[in-house]
Image: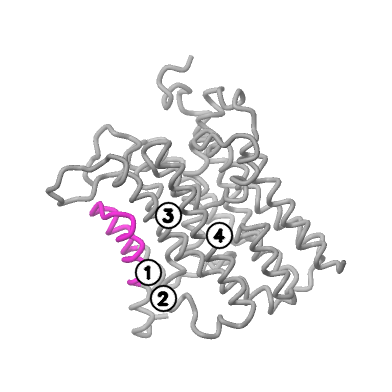
Amino acid sequence: MSPTWIAVLATAAGCYTLKLAGLTVPQRLLASPRVRRFAELVPVALLAALSAVQAATNGQAFALDPARLAGMGAAVAALLLRAPFLVVIVAAAGTAAVLRAAGVT
Amino acid sequence: MPAQTTDSDVPPPPAGRGEPRRASSPAGAARPVRDGVSLGLAVGVSGLAFGAAAVSSGLTAWQACALSLLAFTGASQFALAGVIASGGSLLAGSAGAILLGSRNTLYGLRLADVLRPRGPRRLFTAVGVIDETTAVTLAQPDPASSRTAFTATFWALYLTWNLATLGGALGAGRIGSPQAFGLDVVGPAAFLALIWPRLAAGGTERLVALAAVAIALATAPVLPVGVPVILAATAALAGALASPAAASSGDSQ
């Protein structure tokens, strides 16, 4: 087996094990109110951070893409208007797509 | 922003509809399925970009597909391809990719409590523990919708991501860039939309989210890709330590 295949399979095994580890944590650990509160807050923290990083960087450096930021603006506007989920993502993607079609990059 | 009163976990109803709410089973299952499938399809198309990036980094099409089928976590997959493309060591590439997967462990902590998978089912459920499934699942008002949302999001995303990976690896990416359709905005907009009800409901949640964003953006230029998001979990840790322990669950101790 080539070294690249070993790296691919090791990565897959490691990623799967990490997913399983979270699901397998003993429920009595989650019975502690602070641990439970942490588990409740973690998705909020990670998804907020992920949203910001994906919106405002290219993964590393800041990359303020006008069409993408306008799409995020449209999403926020839709959320403030209490639009349903689908409307929010269509507004976001549609705004970015229209601006790019119009030459905004 | 109009204050939404007490129902903390229930997302706001669609505005401006006169009809009474139909919350019973058929209509109750429709929304999690619709939301999950649409997010899964839209984000899954990014598999085209992964397939193309993987092949141009030197992986074979089979290796790209094996990663999407078995690792199934976009950030880690892109990270491994990136290291291989830059000629870095395979060991470092795998280690970095696996480190990025650790946020799925944190999601699993919460999903275990909501989904309650048991026995062998847990081995299968684990495959689907990623950003998108977590976001849609935890945005649901009750355990039954949460389970429906998880299943719908997982299958839509898993199938699309894998087909798109194959397509991208075989060169379909040249047809058109997902960016032209604004699909790069779908992820960040969806994550924001899905945590929005939590932000509207709780002051601690808002502070934690703001701190998480600040930590991630401040460290993004200096840390390896993906690490800033994991570091943002410290905001949740601070929130959990600072808030009164019984605030969320009411009667515990």
Labels 3 & 4 near each other (Cβ < 8 A): no
Q: Nearer the viewer, residue B132 or A104?
A: B132
Q: Are marks 2 and 4 on the same chain?
A: yes
> Mark 1 falls within which chain?
A
Specify the amino acid type for callout 1. Answer: Ala
Q: Nearer the viewer, mark 1 or mark 3?
A: 3
Disc 3 crowd, CA 10 A, few/some/many (<14, 14-19, 20+): many
Disc 4 crowd, CA 10 A, few/some/many (<14, 14-19, 20+): many
Q: Magenta part of the protein: which range? A: A73-95
Q: Earlier in the sequence, mark 3 or mark 4?
A: 3
Q: Nearer the viewer, mark 2 or mark 3?
A: 3
Label 2: which secondary element: helix
Q: Are marks 1 and 2 on the same chain?
A: no
> Mark 2 falls within which chain?
B
Labels 1 & 2 near each other (Cβ < 8 A): yes
- The residue carrying mark 3 is B36
- Residue beneath the point at 52% across and 33% down: B113
- The residue carrying mark 1 is A93
Image height check: is B20 above or below B113?
below
Which numbered circle lies on residue B139?
A: none
Specify the amino acid type for callout 3. Answer: Gly
Disc 2 crowd, CA 10 A, few/some/many (<14, 14-19, 20+): some
Label 1: which secondary element: helix
- The residue carrying mark 4 is B158
Q: Does the magenta-highlighted stretch encompass residue B137?
A: no
- Residue beneath the point at 50% across and 62% down: A54
Determine the CA span between mark 2 and mark 4.
21 Å
Which numbered circle lies on residue B181?
A: 2
Q: Nearer the viewer, mark 2 or mark 4?
A: 4
Label 3: which secondary element: helix
Whole-percent x, y for residue B138 in the image:
44, 42
